[in-house]
Amino acid sequence: MASTAYDIVVFDLGGVLVQIAQSWAEALQLAGLAPHRGRTGDAFDRARVALGEAYQLGALTSAEYQRRLAAASGGAYVPADIALILDAWSGLEYDGVGAVVDAVESAGATTGALSNTNPAHWARLDGTAEYPTVARLRYRHASHLLGVAKPDPRIFEAFSAAVRVPPGRTLFFDDAPVNVEAARRSGWAAEAVDPDQPTAPQLLAHLRRHGLVGASPD
């Protein structure tokens, strides 16, 4: 067990350890699709959100999600376009996050991931050479596997039960303030990370404040 106040440090993946698109329009651009394809209206946006929520809860397969979202677009997309967008959504790991995991392990704590994601993204993220820092995390859990998504308190309860670490011994990082607040209400210590800025310095600063990393030299 850790000699610090925490036994486990848990990271959200997208926006904390891994760079991701912050909007549908950005993902469209990253996928190399024409911008006009994004102009499908409010009905499509509502369908995209609803289908995305079902997908990240494991209620849809990748093929079903691609087919149904393409159908909701009224011809603006075909399923292959949706697959391209999904693939483009996740980018590289943020610089320096491997050193963050080094610091956590040196402090005697273990590591974990708790991500709202979907089968397509998880196939790339979970234990692959493409994301070596993510692969190092000992406990990796995702919304589509647990059947519940952040900020629902049940996902924090499920994670704590799975890793057998009390909520009060858990430190969590997420880029969504609503998820940070939900984690705190569930008894976790939690801090927000700004995905538009380098995340490793932010994570290390939080680790210092929580006593897991020594103070920086002057």
Image (tube, grey):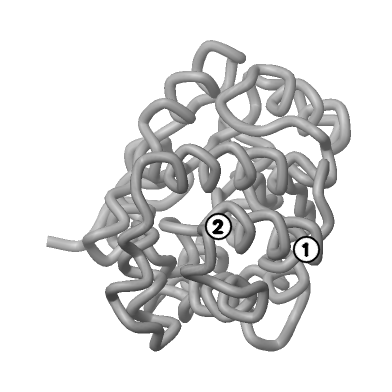
Q: Are marks 1 and 2 in contact (CB under 8 Å)?
A: no
Residue 105 seen anywhere in this rendered image of the structure: no
Q: Tag 1, which secondary structure?
A: helix
Q: Residue furthest front?
A: 74
Instruction: Please indicate whether residue 38 sits to the left or right of residue 13 in the image.
Output: left
Q: Mark 2 is on which residue type? A: Leu
Q: Residue at x 12, y 61 (%)?
A: 218
Give 124 or 119, whichever is nearer the viewer. 119
Please give the label number shown on residue 13: 2
Residue 131 on image: x %, y %: 62, 79
Quadrant hosting residue 33: bottom left
Q: Residue at x 33, y 83 (%)?
A: 34
Gap between marks 1 and 2, in whole Å? Answer: 20 Å
Residue 135 on image: x %, y %: 72, 72
Instruction: Please indicate whether residue 45 sits to the left or right of residue 172 in the image.
Output: left
Please give the label number shown on residue 62: 1
- The 10 Å Cα crowd at callout 1, few under 14, some 14 to 19, many 20 or more, is some
Decide: is 107 above or below 137: above
Residue 143 on image: x %, y %: 72, 42
Quadrant hosting residue 58: top right
- The 10 Å Cα crowd at callout 2, few under 14, some 14 to 19, many 20 or more, is many
Residue 181 on image: x %, y %: 43, 20
Decide: is 20 above or below 107: below
Quarter placement of the N terminus: top right
Instruction: Please indicate whether residue 78 sits to the left or right of residue 160 in the image.
Output: left
Q: Residue at x 65, y 52 (%)?
A: 117
Instruction: Please indicate whether residue 82 sits to the left or right of residue 129 in the image.
Output: left
Decide: is 191 above or below 187: below
Give 15 or 163, whichever is nearer the viewer. 15
Front position among marks 1 and 2? 1
Decide: is 63 above or below 129: above
